[in-house]
Amino acid sequence: MQPVNEMKLEFLSKSSNEAFARVVAAAFVSQLDPTIEELADVRTAVSEAVTNAIIHGYENRIGIITMVCRQYDKSVEIEISDEGAGIEDIEQAMQPLYTSKPEMERSGMGFTVMESFMDMVRVRSKPGEGTTVTLYKTFSSAGK
Amino acid sequence: MEIKFSNRGSTLIAAFSGELDHHFAEYARNKIERELIKATTRDVVFDLTGLSFMDSSGIGVLVGRYVNIRKLGGRAAIICRNTRIKKILEISGVLKLMSVHDELDHALRALSTA
């Protein structure tokens, strides 16, 4: 299916860009006339994915994070990619409460939060090459 | 992000405002820790009413502080009315550690009877 609209954003893996990324994603998604709750869902999920790229992908080195948003009739697809460390075991990484960085007080709930607030989450990763997380959501009010 | 502190007896009330994400997690952690080591503090109420946003980085901050409060013999409770933040607290198991209330009075009562 061809997207109705699309945008691409590249930014440095600085923690101050977490807020920036979720504001941009929410602004783009607003075109679909989502509810306030749906918009908050998107902001939260994007924040989790970008935080993962900064902490786990680049391990606090500075690299480039790419966010691509594609808008369809009633749904959106948000792809967040890094070219960092990658994930050895995706299934383990997605387990609730699993974290590779407990010393940093990471709760291990990032993927669980993304899955709770979006319709679907897909993760592709290659150790040493990077990770792409794709978030999917259909909006109840869209097209009304 | 800002945290304002006040006291009710030996209970510290930490009132958050703004957005709590990974960017502000370390700031929040350090600021609360400095208050926790004061001898006047035993129990803590985390007042999240003023937060417009929190993701799972906030869970790490709250649970990390909870562990330290327990080590010092205290208890903790949360005030939160935001349904999305409540959902994050729920799915991450925080509700098993700390009770969540709509009002400060309820939180204080829960701590005094716990």
Image (cartoon, grey):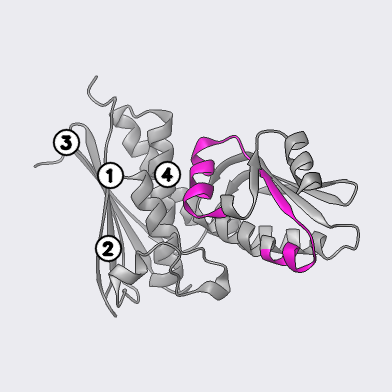
Of marks 3 and 1, which one's residue comes earlier in the chain?
Answer: 3
Characterize the local packing of mark 4: few (<14), some (14-19) or many (20 or more) Cα atoms within 10 angstroms. many
Q: Can you tell which quarter of the image residue A111 is in?
A: bottom left
- Whether discs 3 and 1 lie on one chain: the answer is yes
Q: Is residue A45 left or right of residue A128?
A: right
The stretch of residues the image draws in magenta is B67-94
Element at badge 4? helix
Q: Which residue is mark 4?
A: A43
Q: Amino acid at mark 2?
A: Thr
Q: Which mark is residue A119?
A: 1
* Residue B88 included in the magenta stretch of the image: yes
* Residue A89 included in the magenta stretch of the image: no
Q: Nearer the viewer, residue B68 or A77?
A: B68
Q: Which residue is mark 2?
A: A132
**Marks 2 and 1, how far apart at CA:** 17 Å
Of marks 3 and 2, which one's residue comes earlier in the chain?
Answer: 3
